[in-house]
Amino acid sequence: MPWTAVGQEGGTGSSDPVRPAAWTSPDGCAWRRAAVAPVTPDGQRTGFSSVARRGRLVAALGRSYSQIHGNIRPTLWRSDAGAPLREVQLLRELFGGGRGITMDGLVATPQAFLATGGYLGPDDNVAVHVWRSTNGRDWVRLPPGRAQSSTPAEQLLPRDIAAGGAGSLLVGTSFRVTGDAGFDGAAWYAPAAARQWQRVYLSGTGLADGGDQRLLAAAPLGDGYVAVGAVGSGGGFQLRSAVSRDGVRWSAGGPLSGQPLPAGTPPAADITSLPGGGVVAGTAARGLTELWASPDGRSWTPEMVPGRADRANGVVLGASPDRLVMAVHTPAGPQLRLGRRTR
């Protein structure tokens, strides 16, 4: 308590720049606009992408772009005990500068906040980087291990980060530049006290080894993890899962949708743990939003989407024992939708 949602407003044209926006709710049903406090020009042009809570602290990740060079300029924000989200003033080079590529994930662990993104290493290959903060104010970029670094033959990019009881999981993609060029799912795991992530291999999961596979999202599942990816299938994509009890050894899960999705841009997906057990995934493709629930990350059951599902794209924001909140983009504009568990 309270629920916190972050996003952006504006951005409809050159005279209407993107601005940060946040909302809070005591129950996931009644929402009010929350104050934000940018302190730099980048913060004023930020669109939020992630938010996480650790005790009474809330941290948010945003991104702006250089008005001259177009490179990414991540912004970090912090709120303590219900205070407005305030931008943390940090050296731009810590998260971006000319070597920043992406900034995609933020999560709270029992020990610290962790953020992940792609960053050009000293050898000019992209590395899967992780930044750490215990208070949401002071951030340190952790040196990547060899397994987190790309090579001229394989380019790596993170997409999401998940925190479990024993450690944290990064998921993303590997692009094979030479030979059998194409995308594979990629994943890295680190125990709670570690500062570098080991590459874990996904052979046998259906999310690697030839074809076109991209991991989109991950979440803790009991003592382990579940990941969801898009798999090239018959000229389109199919959404599938993979599961692991320890973050290191993985096996195939199951399909989230029986029908292949059209080719083109891969579908969007988000996944979150249900406090009572299991996980729920939200997917957006073909202008439709779908919800899928699973007790074990293997068998998936379609769930009713709150409100109208047609011509709406949305993904899950979060869940409590009896309710779930989705962010949905509709032709009439963005909406937050609440679903209550009825069984």
Image (cartoon, grey):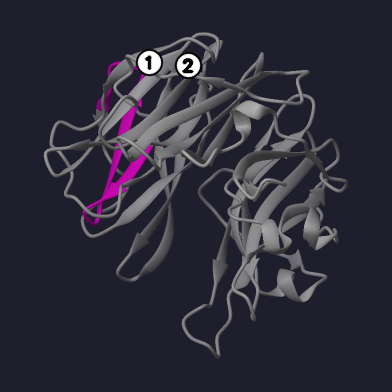
Amino acid tagged 1:
Pro
Q: Secondary structure at mark 2?
A: loop
Residue 120 x, y percent position in the rendering: 65, 50
At 32% from the left edge and 55% from the top edge, which residue is drawn? 313
Cα distance in 3D space between marks 1 and 2: 7 Å
Q: Residue furthest bottom?
A: 15
Residue 21 x, y percent position in the rendering: 62, 65
Q: Secondary structure at mark 1?
A: loop
At 58% from the left edge and 75% from the top edge, which residue is drawn? 18
Q: Which residues are magenta?
A: 282-301
Badge 2 density bin: few <14, some 14–19, many ≥20, Cα 10 Å: few
Vertical arrangement, residue 259 with respect to residue 201, above or below = below
* In magenta stretch: residue 137: no
**Magenta: main secondary structure:** strand
Vertical arrangement, residue 331 with respect to residue 270, above or below = below
- Specify the label residue 277 is tagged with: 2
At 60% from the left edge and 46% from the top edge, which residue is drawn? 125
Pointer 1 and pointer 2: residues touching (CB < 8 Å)?
yes
Residue 112 x, y percent position in the rendering: 78, 31
* In magenta stretch: residue 290: yes
Which quadrant of the structure image shows residue 193? top right
